[in-house]
Image (cartoon, rainbow, N blue to C red):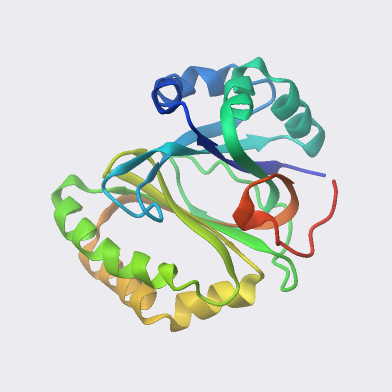
Amino acid sequence: MSQIVTFSFFRVSSKWEAFKKMGQSSSLIKDLPGASFGKMLGTGAGNGFSIFPNLSLYGLLLIWPDVQTAKRSLSDSAELRFWFENATSYGTLFMETCKVHGTWDGKQPFDVATLPKTDMPVAVLTRATIKKSHLFSFWKDVPSVSKSLNHSPEGLYSANGVGEWPLIQQATFSVWQNVSFVENYAYHGEKHRNMVAKTRKTGWYAEELFARFHILEVSGNWLPWQNIKNVTSL
């Protein structure tokens, strides 16, 4: 199997220690055996779509050359031990990329490993660097879209706002039953459709990336992902 992408959530009780560790994340990922790309991500308060941080919840995105390297490094790495041992709950998705466009820090790190399939659970990552001149107008419109996710659109397992830098570099990571539910929300959800149109009109972003992944395996005890169906053991 080709490139594997993992996304993990960690809920911690030691907030200050976790906050310090996040500040060291660039060196952690650099020293992680086998990882070609990685980002430690903070989250916002509430459902994550907020200017206020949630110091109890962190995300970790990593790209690996294959599933064996991913599993070995995630279980054996001293660099990651803090997050797994100090998490009151955590979960990891093992995924393969089926669609991507845009760049992240000027690069496109995801290899498309497979054609889109209609019957598999999917995760969607949208990430953007917001132009400083548009920060106010962007954050004025975000609450209306995030509230639409509070009502749990059909087929949605979870949706979280995450980011590298508060206010400026933001992302959304959502997990769905299959691609039909994603497209129904994207194309027929009024709030989301209006936000996309406004984005195109105003040019909020200096850089943006969209990626869709098939979910192959789920590990851990992260509650929103416990009912994901149609996954296999790699």
Is residue 98 visible in this depiction of the protein? no
* Observer-nearest of 176 and 81: 81
Residue at the right extreme of this rendering: 233
x and y percent of residue 190 in the render? 36, 81
**Left-right relation of 15 to 50:** right
Q: Quadrant of the N terminus?
A: top right
Query: Looking at the image, is 90 positioned above or below residue 218?
Result: above
**Left-right relation of 117 to 87:** right
Q: At 26% from the left edge and 71% from the top edge, which residue is drawn?
A: 198
**Left-right relation of 144 to 21:** left
**Left-right relation of 175 to 143:** right
* Observer-nearest of 158 and 182: 158
Label count reads 0
Q: At 69% from the left edge and 66% from the top edge, which residue is drawn?
A: 116
x and y percent of residue 53 in the render? 32, 41
* Observer-nearest of 201 and 153: 153
Query: Looking at the image, is 50 positioned above or below residue 158?
Result: above
Is residue 205 visible in this depiction of the protein? yes
Name the quadrant containing residue 62. top right
x and y percent of residue 135 in the render? 19, 51
Q: At 31% from the left edge and 76% from the top edge, which residue is drawn?
A: 194
x and y percent of residue 122 in the render? 65, 62
